[in-house]
Image (spheres, helix red, strand yellow):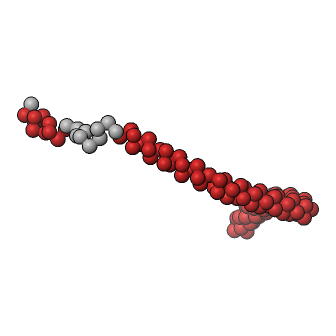
Amino acid sequence: MLEVERVAHKLKINKAGNDGKEWRSHMDQTKKFHEQVKGNLPEVRHKLERLSEEVSKALEKIGKKEQVLTRSFQGMTGDYRAHSDEIKNIQNDFQKVSKNVGDLESELMDVNEKLNKIQDKI
């Protein structure tokens, strides 16, 4: 209990400065901000509308350029797909031939070993 009594004066809330009029100052401040927003609204609205128009124009330009690029590269994409498929086929053929070469080299080594054994016997 002694500890509580020692710090009790620090725990008390001092309301002497407020006198219950704090809500009134908040209300006055809110009215002031409302008037500021109301005064700035037409100018800000005009700026936002102008910005909206500029963004719309920019998006329209981008769309048109995208269409032009799509039309100009349309033939190239077909060529790219054809070349890509051809490269895949060539790579598959290369892998098959490489495997075949490896198998033949292995077979050649076996034949050479047998030949060397036969030569040593003779």
- Say if residue 82 shows up in the picture: no
Give the residue drawn at x 85%, y 60%.
Answer: 64
Give the residue drawn at x 71%, y 67%.
Answer: 116
Please state, as top left, top right, bottom left or bottom right, where the N terminus lies in the image: top left
Q: Is 77 left, or right, of 4 in this rendering?
A: right
The percent position of residue 68, horizontal first and vertical second, equals 88, 63
Q: Is 69 left, or right, of 16 in this rendering?
A: right
Residue 115: image quadrant is bottom right
Foreground residue, 51 or 91?
A: 51
Residue 3: image quadrant is top left
Foreground residue, 98 or 74?
A: 74
- Say if residue 19 shows up in the picture: yes
The percent position of residue 83, horizontal first and vertical second, equals 87, 62
**Total residue callouts:** 0
Give the residue drawn at x 63%, y 55%.
Answer: 44
Furthest-left residue in view? Answer: 2
Give the residue drawn at x 56%, y 50%.
Answer: 37
Q: Is 25 left, or right, of 4 in this rendering?
A: right
The percent position of residue 56, horizontal first and vertical second, equals 77, 56
Foreground residue, 98 or 28?
A: 28
Residue 100: image quadrant is bottom right
Please state, as top left, top right, bottom left or bottom right, where the C terminus lies in the image: bottom right
Furthest-right residue in view? Answer: 75
Foreground residue, 22 or 79?
A: 22
Establish if 21 lies above or below 79.
above
Establish if 81 lies above or below 12.
below
